[in-house]
Amino acid sequence: MQRPTDLERRGTPRKPLHTTGAARHSSRVTAAFALPPYQPPADAAAVRAEVRAFLAANPPPADAVRRANCWSVADAGFSRALGAAGFIGMVWPRAYGGHERPAMARYVVLEELLAAGASVGAHWIADRQTGPLLLRYGSEAQRRKYLPGMAAGTLFACIGLSEPGAGSDLAAVRSRAEKVPGGWRINGQKLWTSGAHNAHAMLALLRSEAGSERQSGLSQFLIDLDTPGISVRPVIDLVGNHDFNEVFFDDVLVGEDALVGVEGEGWRQVTAELALERSGPERYLSSQALLVAVIDAARVAKADNAALNAVIGKLVAELWTLRQMSMATAAMLADGADPVVEAAIVKDLGNDYEQRVPMMVQAVLDIDLDGSTELARVLAHLLQVSPSFSLRGGTREVLRGIIARGLGLR
Amino acid sequence: MSAMRAQLVATAQALFASAPDWAAIEAAGFVQLLVPEADGGFGGDWGDCFAVLQVAGACALAQPLGEAMLAAHLLARAGVVPPPGLVTIGSGAGAVTQGLFTGWVAAVPWGRDAVAVLAAVDTGEDDPLLMLLPAGRVTPGENPAGEPRDRIDHDRVTAVVLGRADHALYGAFLRVAQAAGALAAALDLAVAHVNARVQFGKPLAKLQAVQQALAVLAEESAAVTMAGAAAAAALDGGGGPFEMMAAKLRTNMAIHRGVAIAHQVHGAIGFTQDYPLHPLTRRLMGWRSEFGGDRWAEVLGAVALAEGGAGMWAGITRRG
C-alpha cells in the first residue's frame, strides 16, 4: 500500500450536518407508495430449518410439472401431514386448534412450501382465507365446528364468489338466500370455484335481501358441501386439469348458524379479506419450479451462455425485490394495517413476473417443447397456465383500478 | 422514519429545491453524512443516505452529492483525510509505478470541479486498485441530462492507494436512491397533469386507460423504493453486494417502463424544455448506463448457477 502523501491531512475541520429544524413532514408529500423495509425476526432461520426438515421428510412431487403453480395442486395426505406438524392455522388461537405463532413465522413456512413446490392446494384456501375470516367474523360455534379440522389439514374450504354473470364485477352476484323458519333456503349457481370437488365447505357470497342491488343486501354463508341439493360439476381447464368447478344450489336448506358475520354486511366482509389474498408469496412463486429447473439444467450442462446467465440474473433480482415487497406488506397486515393498495401492487407486479419467467426462459433457451425432458415439460406447462395468474384473485385491470384509486384518480 | 432522518429529509427538501450551488451543499454538511462522528462526520447510516439521495433525485439536483458522500465515507473508512473541496468518484485504467500514477479516469461526475477523484483503476489484475487521484488534464463530457461526465488524464501523479477494491456497486446504490426519488417525482407530475388537463370534455385522469398506465408507474416507483430501502438495510446490516446488484437491475427495469409512461400521459407538454419532467427523465435514462448497467445480471446469474436452484433460493432467504 502506498503511503498517503500530499493529499493527506490537509482537510478542513469537518462540520456537523446541521438541519434546519424544519417541521417534520407529516402526511404523504408524494403520490408514490413506499413500503417500510421489513426486518425479519430473530427466529426466522429456526422456523425455516423446521419447515425444511418437514419437507425433507415429506418431499414435494418428483415431477416438476406437479411442483409448478403448486398451490393449485391438491394432496390431502400432504395437507394432513402438514397439519399434524403444526404448519396450518399457525397464527390461530390454540383453543381452535391453532398454534399462536407469529404472522411472520407463517410467512416463512408458506414461502418455503411454495418455493419447494409442495402440493398445498387442498388446504390453501382454508388456511389463507376461510379460517382467518371465521376468526374475524364467525360465531363461536362456527369457529369450534370448522377451525380445528382446518388446522389439522383435514377440513378443506372453497370460496364461492364468481357466478356466470359475476366475475370481476362481483357486485353482480345473483345467487340468493331466503329466510325460512329455522334458517335459509339457497338457490343459484357459483362458477370457477377452485377446489370445490375437494372441499368440505364453501364460504359463499349470496344475496340475502330480495330485490337488493349491487353491494347492498349481500351476506356470507358457510355451507357444508354435503348438504342435500348441492351438486358440484367439474370445469376442465385448457391443459386438462380439474381445478375449476361449477356448483349448483337447488333449494338447499341450511340453519341460521350458516350465516357468517352480519346479515347484509357481506360486501364489506369480502372486500376486507382481499388484502389477505393478494400479497402473499403465492403471487410471485407460481413459476419458481421452472426457475429452479432451468438453473439446475444449465448447471449440469455446464452451460456457457451469457444470455441465459443474464436472464437468470434479472429474474433473481426481480424475485428478491418482490419478496421484499410481499414481506413488507405481510408485516403491515400483521401490525393491523389495511394495505389494500400495497397488496394490489404486490399481486400485479408478482403476476407479471411469474408470467414472464416462462416467456424469458423460452426466449433464451434453445429447446424443443416436445415433452422429452422435465425442463421442456415444465416450461410448456407454465407457458399454457401462466395467463391465469393475472386473472385469478382479482384481475390485473381490477388491481390497477384499486391502485389508481389510491393515487386519487378515481 | 426516525425523527433524525425525518429532519434530514426536511432539510434536504428545503435546500435541494432551491437548486443550490456546491458550496451551499458542502456548507450544510451533507457530504459528511456517512462519515463517522468520531471522524468529525454526521455518523448517518445507509438508510439516511438513501433518504437524502431520494430527495436529491426528486429535485433533479445537478450536483455530485452522492459521489462526494461515498468518497468521504470510503476515505474515512481507509483512514485517509481528503483535501478540502469536491472529491468525486470515477473508474479508469492505468498503472502505478514507484508511487506515481499514469493513466485515465473516464466519465467522472463533475471531474472538472473536483480537487481529487477516488478512482477504481483497472491495472490488469482481477480487482481494480482504489486510489485517490489529484486533479489532472480534463476533457469535458456530459451525460444525456447535461451533467458533467469528464475524462481526466494523468501522467506520473502522486496517488494515495487505498487497496484492491471497487466502488462500482456503491455507485449503483447511489443511482438507485436517486432514481427512486426521480421516479416518484415523475409520478407526482403525471398525477397532477392528468388531473388538470381536460381532453374529451373531462380530465385525463377519468380515462381508464390513463388510470391503468399510472397504476403501473406507481408500481414501478414502489418497486425501486423497496429495492433501494432493502439494499440500504442490507448495507447497514453489514452485507450488501447482492442487494445492490439486484436493486440496480430492478431500477433499470423500472426506468425503462416508468419513464415511458410518465411521458406518454403528458403528451407533447412533457416534451418541452420548460416543463419540469425532462430533468427527471433524462437523468433516469442516463443512470441506467451508469455503474454497471445491466451487466450485473450476468454476475447474479453466474452466482445462481454456481449455487444451483435450491441454493439460489436459500441465498435469497438467508439475506432476510
Image (cartoon, coloured by chain):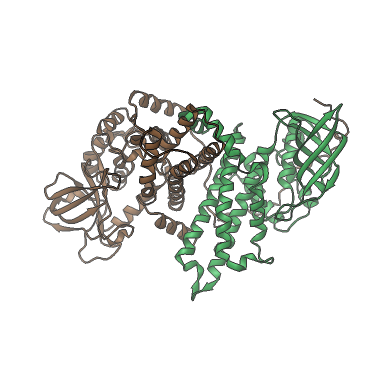
x%, y% of residue A153? 27, 34
x%, y% of residue B295? 61, 40
Q: Nearer the viewer, residue B316 or A269?
A: B316
Q: Nearer the viewer, residue A5 or A183?
A: A5
Q: Left or right: B286 with respect to A285?
A: right
Question: Residue at position x 26%, y 37% from top?
Answer: A150
For this orientation, the residue located farthest to the bottom is B201
- Chain drawn in green: B
Question: Residue at position x 18%, y 45% from top?
Answer: A225
Quick check: B215 above or below A106? below
x%, y% of residue A164? 25, 58
Using the rendered view, name the quadrant where residue B2 is placed.
top right
- Chain drawn in brown: A
Total of numbered circles in the picture?
Answer: 0
Q: Left or right: B184 with respect to B167?
A: left
Q: Nearer the viewer, residue A301 or A129?
A: A301
Split into 4 quadrants, where in the image is the N terminus of chain B? top right
Viewer can see residue A29:
no
Viewer can see residue A323:
yes
x%, y% of residue B65? 73, 47
Q: Left or right: A251 with respect to A68?
A: left
Question: Residue at position x 61%, y 35% from top?
Answer: B235
